[in-house]
Amino acid sequence: MRRVFAALAAALLCSSGGATVPLPDGKQRVIESDAIPQKLSAFGLFPFGPEAPLVSFSYTLRTSLFSDYTDKHRFVSIPDGKQARVLADGTIEFPVGTVLIKSFGWADVNEGRPVETRLLIHRASGWVALPYIWDADGKDATLALGGRRVPVTFKSPGGDVHTIRYGVPNKNQCKECHSLNGAIVPIGPKARNFIFPDEIKTMRSVYFENPAALRPIMPQWDDPKAGSVETRARAYLDVNCAHCHNPAGSASNSGLFLRWTDDPTGVNYGIGKRPTAAGRGSGGMEFAIAPGDPDDSFLIYRLESTDPGIAMPEVGRSTVHKEGAALLRQWIAEMPKDARN
Amino acid sequence: MRFHGLSHHAATLCIVAALAAQPAAAKVISVSATTPDANEKLQEALILAEPGDTVQLDAGTWTLTDGLSLDVANVTVRGAGAGAGGSVLDFAGQQGAGEGLLVTSDDVLLTEFAVLNTKGDGIKSKGADRIVYHKLRVEWTAGPKETNGAYGIYPVESTDVLIDSVYVRGASDAGIYVGQSKNIVVRDSIATENVAGIEIENSYDADVHDNIATKNTGGILVFDLPSLPMQGGHNVRVFENVVNDNSTPNFAPKGNIVASVPTGTGVLVMANRNVEIFDNVFDNNGTTNVMIVGYRYEHKDPKYQPLPRAIVVRGNQHGKAGYAPKFPGGEQIAAAMGGSIPPILWDGAGDAVVLDPVGVLSLNLPDVATPQSEAKPAPVDLSKGTVPAALPAITLPESMEAKVR
């Protein structure tokens, strides 16, 4: 038993700190090949079970995408001797061989173990997105290329109990969000939102060519001390919507662009914008955002719906994010009514 | 006029020809509606297909809970027919995704299957060049309802689009909607009981011909809207269609632009340039057979051109029209004119040439800023204007035409 405990301790260290433990022999080769393994174990990233992968470092985000109240754990595995680089626009460029790992679960489901783990692998041919669902015994996870609905019951922070058929996205749905001009790209790690773990701050220069460029300027959406309602609402929209709602994303045709860097007073930010291809999503309203009037803003209507013909985002949400919608309601309510003119 | 290929069951020869033309390495991946986890298995097949492959949907009804998607180029999705005994993808119990099937890759052929009762759009393709929609049925089977999905067949942001021999019914926006695309042919198709039968929006170079647009709110729409990445719609030919009995009360959710289409509209042109409407057969459109108008909503887009320009109407057959005009003030105007208004209606903004030997009613609103309340309806003669040079026919890449032969 002593050896097992030792291994677990090493793993926990890795998950919160810098990896000095290399991947098992040959696993980096699997990562960089064209293989789409049936089992997650083929990558050698989880020798100790689902909770403590063998990685370079873990990270968090200032504001994170809402995914049915899941707790998400994010990790990066960068090949030994290579570095990531922060580009001028804040995008983080990871070297070939990098794996971004994100595990999803709830504290009160499966005794807190993750339900699924998604890999975003940077191969020579580009990024590949692969969803894996953990087996019942929690020892390994199995590829779910076609996605799956997993029935779960959990309690959200507000105390509500939710029983949903949680949607694990299929490979194509991964791309719907992770798409820029039709190619797969990471969307979470951006300099303005990316938090490198404080405990191993000195390791930043090991993994980043220009670590000083990691400046998380976006506020945490639910921390009133972190910024005004408006800046927090914009952070929320950037993280939850802008991966599709940008001129090169899956919702480019909508003309609704919600990046942190977009003009938040413009019609293309939704202010006084009439529906385009919204169908039932308009809810009988004239504008995405009617300043001063959240009940007449169909952006709110779509966020508060779980009907697939209405709901936004289109992928990855089977519950309403009450707290997020409340922030956006407050933001719209506080806008002067004549902001549209 | 040719209306071949409207039967959903008469395509055996086409299948054999298409399979024979494929390279030897291409494989057929057959999927069955009766497999356990059919939704997941079908989605896996669409993911694992390689360029050149055919994903073959066996006959039967697929009960699907999640939207499907295809992101591999040069794949054919082929069913066993779009009719009741064919391959029917039933989305009545859909729990996720904004459409039934989403295509995001080039050179895809979709043929011989039906998509029913999706919560959002039926089949959408985005950035999918040279896509062919052929012998498909997209339908909301309870007929017109505001809770139906918006678009039936929905290609957007694509170059070279062919929609051939499809049947679309019940869309709460447009049955066939082509948006922000270039080089488009919509032909030999039936659009019925939708709000808009066929709509070409913010697009360039389209031929819409040999279709039947019947029992919609509006038959065929050619629109251009502001504040979108691609605008300035132009060069659209609408010809040899049957556009009749578009009498379904408008059931679009309010706020959407088509919610403003008056019931009983045949062809509606809004804010486009170089649109030709010719050799169509119009009948029983209570508001008007052809309506030509500017975009009259508030907007803040300095690049946007809200007027219809260089519109040509010629050679059409006009049956009964204008007997129940459903635009504001329409019924009073009809009463004043002896019970009905002429079959062609112009709001008075922009320019159009009408060579059909029928009356034209102008609302005499010289620009889009003049409110509709100031309309001064009066007959107008638009036959004297200079006819713009005729638009060339749309030619699609031969690889696309070969797929439907």
Image (cartoon, rainbow, N blue to C red):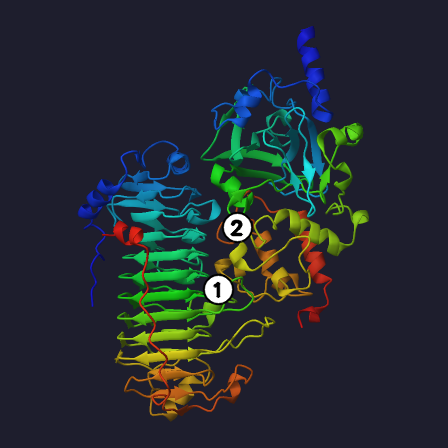
Secondary-structure class at tag 1? loop
- Say which mark, if any, is on residue B253: 1
Q: CA distance from mark 2 to mark 1?
A: 24 Å
Q: Position of residue A225 (x, y in %)?
A: 82, 48
The amino acid sitting under disc 1 is Pro
| Image position of B81 (left or right of B301) | left
Q: Is residue B8 visible?
A: yes
Mark 2 or 1, which is nearer the eye? 2
Secondary-structure class at tag 2? loop
Q: Position of residue B303 (x, y in %)?
A: 57, 71
For the residue pair A68 and A177, the one nearer the viewer reads as: A177
Which quadrant holds residue A14? top right
Q: Chain of mark 1?
A: B
For the residue pair A313 and B182, the one nearer the viewer reads as: B182
For the residue pair B249 and B236, the one nearer the viewer reads as: B236
Which residue sits at x=68%, y=48%?
Answer: A89
